[in-house]
Image: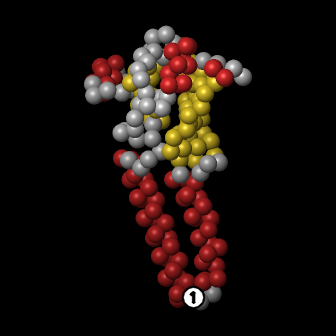
Amino acid sequence: MNEQNTYEFVVDEKSEGKAKTRKIIGRGVILLIITTYVVIALSIFAALAILPVALLPLVLYFWKQFNVELEYSMTSGIMSFTRIYGSRRRKQVLELTIKDMKEIAPVTADTQAKLDAMGIKKTYLFHSSVTAPDRYYAVFEKDGDTCVVYFEATAKALHILHYYNHATVVTAVSR
């Protein structure tokens, strides 16, 4: 493939807002299950032999669910957004044609007001955190609704975006 037309970028999703709440609830459920097993194990000595074997699948399952990476890739004018769970299971969330994006710009203080005026119906988050450097947004149409996706841009990503969509706003980035 052409080096200039293909690019991938992966970030780890940080715990903030709803994601942080899900992690806290998940850890609480795990702690409750572990406590229940310990109580049972203490009252029934034979359960001590089964306890590590019974807990291993739970620990592996929850580790995979809470260890999420966010990836976007650009190939031949198509931008794909994927969530990677536990470094193994991939789920493609979104696939867009770069030239069909209405606006691609850096996130600033007045971005939310601008997007509210556009009537955004759906938001996709593909940045590691709301405080991450070089956050950009892209506005696009999906199933007749105006949507926005947030992502972390690099210089090479902006170069490719500008190549396929000249209306792209390109500014300096730290990566």
Please identify the quadrant where the N terminus is shown. Answer: top right
Residue depicted at 30% across the width and 21% down the height? 114
Residue depicted at 69% across the width and 20% down the height? 2
Percent of width and height locating residue 25: 42, 59
Residue depicted at 59% across the width and 59% down the height? 61
Q: Nearer the viewer, residue 120 or 130?
A: 130
Percent of width and height locating residue 152: 46, 32
**Amino acid type assigned to the residue bearing label 1 in the image:** Ile
Q: Is residue 141 left or right of residue 93?
A: left
Q: Is residue 123 left or right of residue 40?
A: left
The colour scheme used here is secondary structure
Residue depicted at 38% across the width and 47% down the height? 16
In this rendering, does residue 98 appear at all?
yes
Q: Quadrant of residue 170?
A: top left
Percent of width and height locating residue 164: 56, 13
In this rendering, does residue 144 appear at all?
no
Graded by Cα atoms within 10 Å as few (under 14), some (14 to 19) or many (20 or more), the crowding at tag 1 reads few
Q: Nearer the viewer, residue 161 or 47?
A: 161
Q: Quadrant of residue 132?
A: top left
Percent of width and height locating residue 43: 53, 88
Q: Nearer the viewer, residue 2 or 56?
A: 2
Q: Residue furthest right?
A: 1
Q: Is residue 78 left or right of residue 24?
A: right
Whether residue 103 is situated above or below residue 81 in the rendered picture: above
Whether residue 108 is situated above or below residue 129 in the rendered picture: above
Number of marks: 1
Whether residue 100 is situated above or below residue 19 in the rendered picture: above
Q: Is residue 4 left or right of residue 62?
A: right
SS at badge 1:
loop
Q: Which residue is mark 1?
A: 44
Q: Quadrant of residue 125?
A: top left
